[in-house]
Image: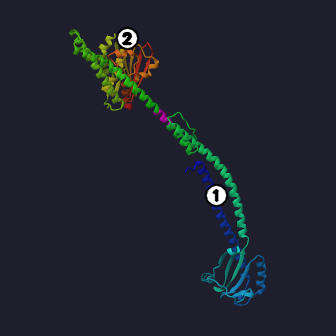
């Protein structure tokens, strides 16, 4: 059975108020009863002490000062107070009408009187809807117990006063409960509305809608929950976008790999079938075998670059860091790419400031620079490729500049994507034809704790800038 949160809130508020007023009523009622009895007790003790101080101790030896006692009786009777004077044996001396009647005391009460202690007894006569206070005062002379004075007075009006107080308290409770019910309804509606917003938002997220935002407040836990909910939705939205992006990239990857594999496999298959069926003339067989070899190497490079990329992406590459003179690395790059640059009628040159040192993995640094340099040679003809290097206090800066065709500004961010090709003609180039080189370059630079940037202008060349931290700065 559902019990709405609105009713739970209202019931809890009203319940707490009613319980509080009930406890208050009980406590105040008991306190008032105690106060009434205490006032009456103090009044009786005061009159009793005054009376005993005026009486001669000989009264307790069967000589009664009726004049003084009668005067006190008249005064106390007007205050609805009655008294009995008794001797050391507990027999009444006054009033004379009850003379020699034995007053019945309990053993405990009598023991306390003999020891000089006063005895107070509160009687609640529920049968007569009345209460009474009895005070028994002992009288001693030189340590000798001579008797005592028993004073009694009904506590009239106490119940009426308490009943009237309870009546006012009930009226107050009813009024406060009505006000509390109204305020509780308003507050509960506010809380329920906020919770309902979260519930609706949760249902929307469950349905796949991540463009949802819940109003946030910072004054209670529901507001904090709304804030955390918005953060969660944002994270889910980012994750969903990332999943969609990965799915699109997966599809693109499959399409690109299929496209890249299709051409060499078709070529290899055609040559093999031609050789098998004798359709290739003898003088063309050597050229066909060379073509198969080249296409096979293309496939091997594709597989190798993909494996390398996956290792780097999943951080499975272990770097062996060391300090390397940048000039030596540039010379190696220049030597390895000299023939390729010459074929494109390009000039490779080195510009070094001072003697910069690179803190990097040697093999991976060569791989980074070779990939970028090949890319520059590929898109430059009758131009220049310049390898620059310099060092600051905390980093080594490497620049590879070319005077080639440049990159369209819209393509600069895309060149790091796997299989991306800014120029379709790249697929016919033997260097970097699969579009994996720059993806690998960026991953390797990031693994070194560095950064890589590209600045380019269409038709006016490109500059790749690599910033690698020095050993002292790590």
Q: Nearer the viewer, residue 279 or 294?
A: 279
Task: Say whether residue 101 is left or right of residue 383.
Answer: right
Which residue is at a point 34% across and 26% down the rendered structure image?
358
Looking at the image, residue 220 lies above or below residue 459: below
Residue holding disc 1: 18
The answer to whether marks 2 and 1 mark residues whose Cβ atoms lie closer than 8 Å is no
Image quadrant for the C terminus?
Answer: top left
Which residue is at a point 27% across and 20% down the rendered structure image?
296
Instruction: Determine the secondary structure under disc 1.
Output: helix
Q: Magenta segment, which residues? A: 233-239
State whether residue 49 appears in this view: no
Which residue is at a point 63% across and 56% down the rendered structure image?
17
Q: Residue furthest left?
A: 282
Residue holding disc 2: 383
Magenta-highlighted stretch: main secondary structure?
A: helix
At label 2, counting other C-alpha atoms closer than 10 Å, the crowd grade (few under 14, some 14-19, many 20 or more) is some
Q: Nearer the viewer, residue 333 or 194?
A: 194
Q: Nearer the viewer, residue 344 or 241?
A: 241
Residue 412 image-quadrant placement: top left
Task: Say whether residue 396 is left or right of residue 336.
Answer: right
Task: Say whether residue 75 is left or right of residue 15.
Answer: right
Q: CA distance from mark 2 to mark 1?
A: 93 Å
């Amino acid at each position: 059975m559902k019990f709405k949160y609105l009713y739970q809130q209202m019931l809890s508020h009203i319940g707490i108020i009613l319980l509080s007023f009930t406890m208050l009523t009980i406590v105040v009622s008991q306190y008032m009863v105690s106060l009434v009895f205490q006032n009456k007790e103090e009044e009786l003790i005061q009159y009793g002490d005054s009376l005993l101080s005026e009486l001669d101790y000989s009264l307790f030896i069967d000589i009664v000062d009726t004049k003084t006692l009668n005067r006190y009786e008249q005064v106390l009777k007007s205050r609805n107070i009655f008294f009995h004077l008794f001797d050391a044996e507990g027999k009444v001396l006054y009033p004379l009408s009850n003379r020699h009647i034995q007053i019945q005391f309990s053993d405990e009460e009598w023991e306390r009187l003999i020891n000089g202690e006063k005895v107070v007894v509160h009687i609640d006569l529920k049968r007569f809807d009345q209460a009474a206070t009895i005070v028994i005062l002992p009288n001693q002379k030189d340590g000798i117990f001579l008797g005592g004075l028993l004073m009694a007075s009904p506590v009239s009006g106490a119940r009426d006063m308490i009943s009237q107080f309870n009546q006012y308290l009930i009226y107050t409770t009813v009024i406060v409960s009505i006000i509390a019910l109204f305020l509780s309804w308003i507050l509960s509606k506010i809380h329920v509305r906020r919770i309902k917003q979260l519930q609706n938002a949760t249902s929307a997220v469950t349905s796949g809608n991540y463009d949802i935002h819940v109003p946030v407040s910072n004054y209670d836990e529901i507001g904090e929950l709304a804030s955390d909910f918005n953060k969660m939705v944002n994270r889910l939205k980012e994750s969903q976008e990332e999943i969609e992006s990965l799915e699109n990239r997966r599809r693109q990857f499959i399409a690109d790999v299929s496209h890249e594999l299709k051409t060499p496999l078709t070529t290899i298959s055609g040559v093999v079938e031609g050789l098998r069926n004798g359709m290739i003339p003898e003088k063309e067989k050597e050229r066909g075998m060379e073509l198969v070899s080249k296409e096979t190497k293309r496939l091997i490079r594709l597989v190798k670059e993909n494996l390398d990329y996956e290792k780097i992406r999943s951080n499975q590459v272990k770097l062996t860091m060391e300090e390397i003179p940048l000039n030596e690395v540039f010379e190696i790059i220049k030597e390895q790419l000299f023939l390729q640059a010459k074929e494109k009628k390009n000039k490779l040159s080195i510009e070094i400031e001072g003697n910069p040192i690179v803190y990097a993995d040697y093999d991976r640094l060569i791989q980074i620079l070779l990939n970028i340099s090949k890319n520059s040679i590929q898109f430059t003809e009758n131009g220049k490729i310049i390898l620059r290097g310099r060092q600051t206090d905390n980093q080594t800066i490497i620049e590879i500049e070319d005077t080639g065709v440049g990159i369209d500004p819209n393509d600069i961010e895309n060149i790091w994507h796997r299989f991306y090709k800014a120029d379709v003609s790249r697929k016919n180039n033997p260097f970097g034809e699969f579009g994996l080189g720059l993806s690998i370059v960026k991953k390797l630079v990031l693994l070194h704790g560095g950064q890589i940037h590209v600045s380019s202008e269409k038709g006016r060349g490109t500059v790749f800038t690599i910033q690698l931290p020095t050993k002292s700065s790590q």
